[in-house]
Amino acid sequence: MRILLAVIGFCFCTLSLFSQSSNGKQRDSIRKYIFLSQNEKLADSVRKDYAMRALEYSTHFSKDSLSLISIKNAISFFDPSEIKYKELNNQLLDLSSKAKDSSSLADAYYNLGKFYVANLNVDSSYYFHYEAEKLYKAINDDWNTAQVLLAIASIQRDEKDFTGSEILSFEALSYLDKLPDAFLYTRKKAFVYNNLGIVFLQLEQYDQAIKYHQQALKIKEGLSGDNTRTIDISKSNLANVYMEMGNYEMANTYNQDILKRAEVRKENPGFYGLVLGNYAHSLYLSGDHEKLPELYLEALKICDSAHAEYQTIIINQRLAEYYNAYNKKDSAKYYAYRAKDISEKYHNDDLLKSLLILSKVEDDSTSVNYYKEYIELNDSIQKNERAIRDKFFRIRYETNKIEKEKDRIARERLLLMIILGAVLFTFVLIYIILSQRAKNKELKFARQQQETNEEIYNLMLSQQDKVDEARALEKKRISEELHDGILGRLFGTRLSLDSLNMANSDEAIKTRGNYIEQLKDIEQDIRKVSHDLNTDFISNTSYISIIKTLLETQSTAYGFEYEFIYDDTIHWDDISNKIKIHIYRVLQESLQNIYKHANASKVKISFKLKNNVIWLSIKDNGIGFDVTKAKKGIGIKNINSRAQEIEAHVEIKSTKNRGTTIQLKIPVS
């Protein structure tokens, strides 16, 4: 059996070591692939392949930090609009929930919000961003809190909730202000200012819009590195604000500043075409039509070649307006319908404007129909915007309500736990106090018992001293009797015999016979004295005297008669003090019980010795009790306890109205 257990143990250890070794190799592989995926010198496709390999290996380590790192690393290689991006973030959501990793959970919510933004699902994007916001705030992650607040502000801006977007933008700035002046944090401030500029433009607060766009531009120009692309975006935004204000000169200044750089057309042709279209429209509005419509057409051509379809919507709309102004209906209709067809794929605002243009360029009933469509869509958009704003408010309200309810439940649970803890503590304290009191009582009782035992022992010693004193006096008496009585008579008889030793008369013979008789009497006296010396006349009387004293005292106090019988053959001096003390206490306890419960008038106590066993019998003529049914009181328990201490056997017999007998059998060696 031992050999089998040893073999099993060896196999288990081997498998365990093999498993640990295998796990270690897999972890090393995961770390290696993650490291390779982050090597920017490699092609993006190769890096992505390494990231997916690391993710595949990490599936063996659920709830493991390495698995979380692997999945986050893989997510970074997918565009937020891709389904795989969503799938990976759902995995991250599930894994971080199980691992109770709040930071990773917040990242998963944030990324899912990005996915739904990219796929134009406003409700879901707002919900997931808001969940991320709460978690980032809970873990005091100021940077990510600022990022997600800006993302939500952008969603609200696009859905025409300009007030909500403004509030969250300023809240994002308050979190960014807590962070150091690092490149990443400072650039994010520029993005927030940019959002505020767009919001105030929509609210037609042009001075505020210019203020925040200029702040964004100033930050971007002060950043290290090449930031020309983001700088151009800020300039374009400023140009749009000035164009809406009617300050076409300033608008053209910013647009021309962008267009004069040839590299913009190469690096970002879609943006270049949009700026060129804005520049053309600024010229149109200012009345400078010399370069029109060529600039419009060039901008449209650039956007088409760059596949920047969305940017072509506004250029087509402006071309339709331009040709309609010159009463070129066919061209106006062509570009108006083209704008409508493209805008149907995108935002309703673009479609709304396209319908309005068609109502202007078309004739009669067709124009009326498009205007009706415009009105219906405008009403629908306004209702939808109100519904979305309400939904944003409701999501925050309901979520806050749920959070408050959770807090309330948590507080109630905490209060309940405190109350339960206090009650438990009180019970424990009461138990300790009661236990301590019981222990104190036990100690007090034990101390009293010890004092009583010492008192009995001292009494026995005192009695023994009296016995020793009596023995000494008796020996002195016998000595004096021998010296003064027997020896004197013996000496006188001896002298008389010496005087008659040589006489042979009848009188002498008779006298010698008398002296011989006297010698016989003296012999008897000597034998008697010898017998008295050989017999301890007060043997065993000390302990018995103590018992008698107890009986006399208790019987007088309790008001009953007693009969005491004892066996002289019991040598109490040879019995240990422990046994004698316990016998004394049992007898004392029994007499107390008789007084309290039996109502007896007579008690009989006897000591007998049978086969080295002392039989103590205590019998009363009291009322008796049912031994099988009666509840054992402290008195009987004490008797049993003392009997156990000296390995004695207790037997209690009782009959109602006929008395009770307690027998104690104490073995002695």
Image (cartoon, rainbow, N blue to C red):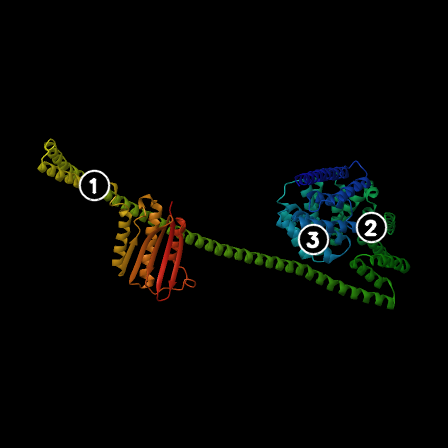
Which of marks 3 and 1 precedes in the sequence?
3
Mark 3 residue type:
His
The alpha-carbon separation of the residues under discs 1 and 3 comes to 123 Å
Foreground residue among 309 and 576? 576
Label 3: few (<14), some (14–19) or many (≥20) C-alpha neighbours in 10 Å: many
Residue at point 40%, 59% (across, down): 632
**661 left or right of 296 in image:** left
Instruction: Say which element carries label 3.
Output: helix
The residue indicated by pointer 2 is 277
Label 2: few (<14), some (14–19) or many (≥20) C-alpha neighbours in 10 Å: many
Instruction: Say which element carries label 2.
Output: helix
Quadrant showing the N terminus: top right
* Residue 416 position within the rendered picture, expressed as x and y whole percent measured from the top left: 53, 57
Mark 2 residue type:
Gly
The residue indicated by pointer 1 is 529
* Residue 157 position within the rendered picture, expressed as x and y whole percent measured from the top left: 71, 55
Does residue 159 lie above or below 482 as drawn? Answer: below
Label 1: few (<14), some (14–19) or many (≥20) C-alpha neighbours in 10 Å: some
The alpha-carbon separation of the residues under discs 2 and 3 comes to 34 Å
Regarding residue 469, the answer to whether it shows in the image is no
Regarding residue 136, the answer to whether it shows in the image is yes
The residue indicated by pointer 3 is 129
**263 left or right of 142 in image:** right
How many numbered discs, if any?
3
Mark 1 residue type:
Val
Residue 155, quarter of picture: bottom right
* Residue 526 position within the rendered picture, expressed as x and y whole percent measured from the top left: 20, 39
Quadrant showing the C terminus: top left
Residue at point 71%, 53% (across, down): 154
The image's mark for residue 647 is none
* Residue 539 position within the rendered picture, expressed as x and y whole percent measured from the top left: 27, 45
